[in-house]
Amino acid sequence: QESKVPEVRVGILEYGTVAWELATVKDYELDAAHDIALEIVPFAGEDATAIALKTGAVDVIVSDWLWVSRMRSEGEDFVLTPYSTSAAALMVPQDSPLEDIEDLTGQRLGVAGGPLDKSWLLLQGLASERFDRDLAEANEISYGAPPLLSEMLKADRLDAVLTFWHYAARLEAEGFRELIGTQDVAYALGAKGNVSMLGYVFRRDWARDNPEAIQGFIAATTAAKQLLASDDDEWRRLQETGVIRDEGETLLALRDSYRDGIPRRGGAQDRQDAALLYEILAQIGGEDLVGGARVFDPETYWGLAGAR
Amino acid sequence: MQVRAEPLARLGWFVASFSALVLVWAIVSTLVDQRYLPSPGAVLTVMLAETADGDLPFHLSMTLMRVAFAFVLAMAIGGAIGMALGARARLDRFFLPWLIVALNLPALVVIVLSYIWFGLTEAAAIGAVAVNKIPMVAATLREGTRALDPLYSEMAKVFRFSWVARLRHVVLPQLQPYYAAAARSGIALIWKIVLVVELLGRSNGIGFQVHLYFQMFDVAGILAYALAFVLVMLAIDGLLLQPFERHARRWRTVNA
Amino acid sequence: MQVRAEPLARLGWFVASFSALVLVWAIVSTLVDQRYLPSPGAVLTVMLAETADGDLPFHLSMTLMRVAFAFVLAMAIGGAIGMALGARARLDRFFLPWLIVALNLPALVVIVLSYIWFGLTEAAAIGAVAVNKIPMVAATLREGTRALDPLYSEMAKVFRFSWVARLRHVVLPQLQPYYAAAARSGIALIWKIVLVVELLGRSNGIGFQVHLYFQMFDVAGILAYALAFVLVMLAIDGLLLQPFERHARRWRTVNA
Amino acid sequence: MLKVEINSQALGHGEKKVDVLARVTFRVDTGRLICLTGPSGCGKTTLLRLVLGLETLDDGSIVVPSGRVAAVFQEPRLLPWRSVEDNIRLALGSNKERVDIGSLIDRVGLAGKGRNFPGELSLGQARRAALARAFAVAPDLLLLDEPFASLDQETAMRLRETLMSVWSRRPTTTLMVTHDLVEAAQLADEVIVLGGRPATIVARRVLAWDRRQRDAAYTAEVAAQLAEVMRAALPGL
Amino acid sequence: MLKVEINSQALGHGEKKVDVLARVTFRVDTGRLICLTGPSGCGKTTLLRLVLGLETLDDGSIVVPSGRVAAVFQEPRLLPWRSVEDNIRLALGSNKERVDIGSLIDRVGLAGKGRNFPGELSLGQARRAALARAFAVAPDLLLLDEPFASLDQETAMRLRETLMSVWSRRPTTTLMVTHDLVEAAQLADEVIVLGGRPATIVARRVLAWDRRQRDAAYTAEVAAQLAEVMRAALPGL
Ligand SMILES: Nc1ncnc2c1ncn2[C@@H]1O[C@H](COP(=O)(O)OP(=O)(O)OP(=O)(O)O)[C@@H](O)[C@H]1O
Ligand SMILES: Nc1ncnc2c1ncn2[C@@H]1O[C@H](COP(=O)(O)OP(=O)(O)OP(=O)(O)O)[C@@H](O)[C@H]1O
Ligand SMILES: [Mg+2]
Ligand SMILES: [Mg+2]
């Protein structure tokens, strides 16, 4: 037999956005091309992937830097490398009178991910900085599961929904419009560019012990990203192989959003902006959100100077 | 004198039992990673802090309110359905498959549909929980009703008991253990579902908080909130359920 | 002849009942948005498609496997605990608070801790489900054991029944309705928890699939998978539980 | 008036189905007391259950007098979770005031046991409580299934007297099952002997003497005659 | 040999606590049969329960012969969910082979009812099944609580004979409660009359005659004497 290549087990949401990228890796055997063996372990919920990483059932998952930083403050040596700058968007119906976040008072506002969701906290931070308004107080907030919130918005039981980007993309395809996206908020708060909200997360020990594995994995996924970014046919393939179940407008919207979210900056700049945002988040979210760590842990980003 | 001593003795037993439980927990928590099972002290600290800032009492009271409403609804409706099915063989034959379907409908489906149809409202939440529990109460009371002793129903028929008297003096005393079982495991189940309901679409309550802490893997926070509810349940059990049961069971202890 | 006709009559009742249920569903589904409650036909289509490509049988069998293991575990252990508590007043006094705590531990906490301690394994998943259900079985059987008629235990004592004979011929027949109640609502509860367990840490099973469809808000998909399980439960109930119950209840129907 | 016209009655299902009663026809005129006797297992209780409407009659007709009904079952059938007093009170339905439950309890020899649960009584005491319950109703139709079994002679005698005094106060149509032929000879206006399989009436004896004038000699003689009739009618058990 | 030495026994709790038995002392030599009688509610069943170990004795001591025990309770106490046959078989424990259950069922007049559930029997039939169960055990100590109540005379007589034949086959120490003084005079080696509140032994009568030679005149006379003793000892009930 041929020499054994290192195995990388990635826990993902089946039909989630990461699945598109990894399916592409698999379809083109990009993993073998970069001397790794990729194993996709599907789960049904975000929480499940987090547990899977914690218990060592997988090597890599996708999560945000806020979570990684919080876990680090509790002694877990997790690190991340950028995966996507997409995060969330505040969606309203096409004919909604809402034009700006300044209009957000007295609205029925749905928020995906709960009160400690990063996008929601940033939005609150922006509102309080700009208009000295507490969004949580000024509106009627419903926290809930994203699919449920989408349906609520469609059923006119909510006026606006702050939801994760792929749900937002689907809503957009159905004629809803984006009031503001997380990146816009980040810019407004002083970020210098598109911040990678999501990253591939893994244990630093694992990465140190398996340098070929993590490097091969990053290279393979980067190659997949390029394919998806440049060639529209790739998306038809994903749809035909059943990785994406959406069709028509929705597929296009998802495609565009995905492409928008591909990180284009170096990790160092990302880290700077993340540190900035973290401070804001720590202020609003308080200890509930960030735990004991008041300042951003620079080691959160893997592979940068100072992280060795 | 001896009668007076009873409640004290019961309290003593409870304290002993509870202390032993906390002790076991304390010992186990020193054996495993504190992050995954914090010590009783650590959890108590969180509990006190959350109580001091008013969060815990608020979320606890919201959850208790939902549990209470759903419980009353489920026991009343489920009990009535169960007793009807247990008493009438024809009804039972026809509706037993419905009961089984209802029993096995996933909570998720019921909760989501109820939110969608009735909005993210309190009524939808409580209704969804009750709908989840009703078939379980019905299944238990159905068995209880089928196990009723015909000796007594016949007597009641001969002496022409009114239906109220039949229910109160003939049927319910025999169903007491079934109601007790349905109540104890009922509150527990309801609260488990309330957690899911709060998770999917409420903005307060213990389930909401537990999920928040869960996202952060803060086990101490999860346990603090969960245990607050458990403590309330212990109090309700000791101060309401058990005295009622002792009353209802007086006749049984006569030769024990 | 009449004995032969019985199973046929039962089948007839079942078909009538089930058709009526589907009819009600069909009617309701025309009244509301199809997206939120698809028609029986639409769900059947999904079900057939998923069966044809092998997905549904696979996930269904995984879930059934988990439900079956957890069920057996929970009934055996919970039954033993409940009978012990019901039979011994001292044990009961001491451990009742433990039981209440166990009853009210949130499923989420148990599931997460069990995954963290024992890894994302099948055993951890099944164990977590069983742990969630055990206290409920115990609570039900505890009531049943407390309601045992001392008449028969005394007789057994005088005639020096072996403990096996006591259990088999004296105790269990009296506990039959409690076991039946615990079994029916038990499977239902276990499967509800299996859904959560699969959501939190398995890569297959109906809970896994249902949640995926929930992400896409595909109610037809959710219902197709949920109903596949419900159908299996209906079959188990009709082919296993009910015949067993009829056998166990023969003596009751003598004067009915 | 109670009219019983049974043509046939079976019990049980399948293999265990048994023809219990064949043709059994009799009437009890208003205010009269008929004793029913016959070997154990011949169908006496079944007959009472038919009259009480607890069993559906296969073939025949039973006409029950209107008004209140009371019964003493072969077992006490007190609600174990209710006190003796409550058991009696519950049987009264709405006409609670009229009856002095306390004195009734005294008369059946249960003074001081009113608040006991049935489980705290001896079997004989429980039977007496069941008798008190039936008396309390002041019924138009009274059915008694061996009401004085497992009582000592003294107590049984006093209860028979109590029965007679309650019974004579208002016209009560009574059907009583007993194995005690002396008892039957003391109390009955007519004695009906059931027997055979399925059971029919194998003998009946009308007792014309006023029951207050029946002395020990008379009852002993009648009892002996009845025993003779029974032995003759039912050779091998 | 069964040795009963009761100094006092109370039942119940709190207000309802009753001193049931005062000093009651007697023995039953191996292979003898003693009848216990007394007014309803005086404590006979309680005494049997003490001997059976179903009640803990407040003050006194009871020595029970070694070997197997069987009892006929005042109610049949058959397991309703087991057939008559199974009820008997279960009481046998391990020595199943030795006993021919079928012929025993026939002897108590339940031929053909072996596969019936107790709920499919008349009360008298259920009592007979309970008797058959006790006989099947071939016990060293046999306790009978009014075993022949609610049976017709004929059946009762035949069962008494069955009891005697089973009993005489091996030395069975027997304590039997009965209200039927004639029955006591026929069967007992000694009759003990309980009475009073709390109950003590108010009279005892040793019957020296061989039981096979006792004729109707003898038993009637003894029964009458016993009744007289009881009446004298227990004035107002
Ligand atoms: N469900 C049943 N299935 C089969 N046989 C039954 C059933 N119920 C009663 N029997 C039979 O019917 C017969 C009549 O019973 P019933 O109780 O009327 O007798 P009885 O005359 O009252 O006897 P006893 O004096 O012993 O009380 C009995 O032989 C009994 O075995
Ligand atoms: N748990 C109890 N609490 C209070 N009193 C009780 C309790 N159990 C029994 N008794 C009383 O004890 C007395 C004796 O009862 P026991 O059953 O021994 O009488 P018995 O002689 O067998 O009467 P019978 O001939 O009616 O069967 C009765 O007066 C009864 O009321
Ligand atoms: Mg009878
Ligand atoms: Mg007694």
Image: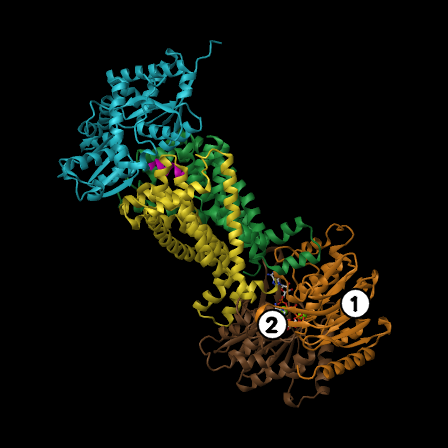
Chain colours: A cyan, B yellow, C green, D brown, E orange
Horizontally, residue D98 falls left or right of residue C152, namely: left
The answer to which quarter of the image holds residue C152 is: bottom right
Q: Residue at x 15, y 38 (%)?
A: A131
Looking at the rendered image, the quarter that the C terminus of chain A falls into is top left
Count of all numbered marks drawn on residues in the image: 2
Residue that extends furthest to the top in the rendered view of this protein: A2
Q: Which residue is drawn at 30% across and 33% down?
A: C216
Q: Does the magenta stretch include residue B51?
A: no
Residue range of the region highlighted in magenta in the rendering: C220-227
Tell me which corner region of the image, top left, top right, bottom left or bottom right, holds residue A32.
top left
Label 2 sits on a secondary structure element that is helix
Residue B170 position, x and y percent, is 49, 65
Tell me which amino acid carries mark 2. Answer: Ala
Name the foreground residue: A219 vs A204: A204
Ligand 3 lies in quarter: bottom right
Task: Say if labels 1 and 2 share a chain.
Answer: no
Mark 2 residue CB less than 8 A from any atom of ligand 2: yes
Answer yes or no: is residue C108 visible.
Answer: yes
Question: Could you tell me the amino acid type at mark 1?
Answer: Glu
Predominant secondary structure in magenta?
helix
Residue C180: tell me if it is visible.
no
Q: How crowded is mark 2: few (under 14 residues within 10 Å), some or many (20 or more)?
A: many
Chain letter for the residue marked with disc 1 in the picture = E
User: Which label sits on residue E161?
Assistant: 1
Residue D126, label in figure: 2
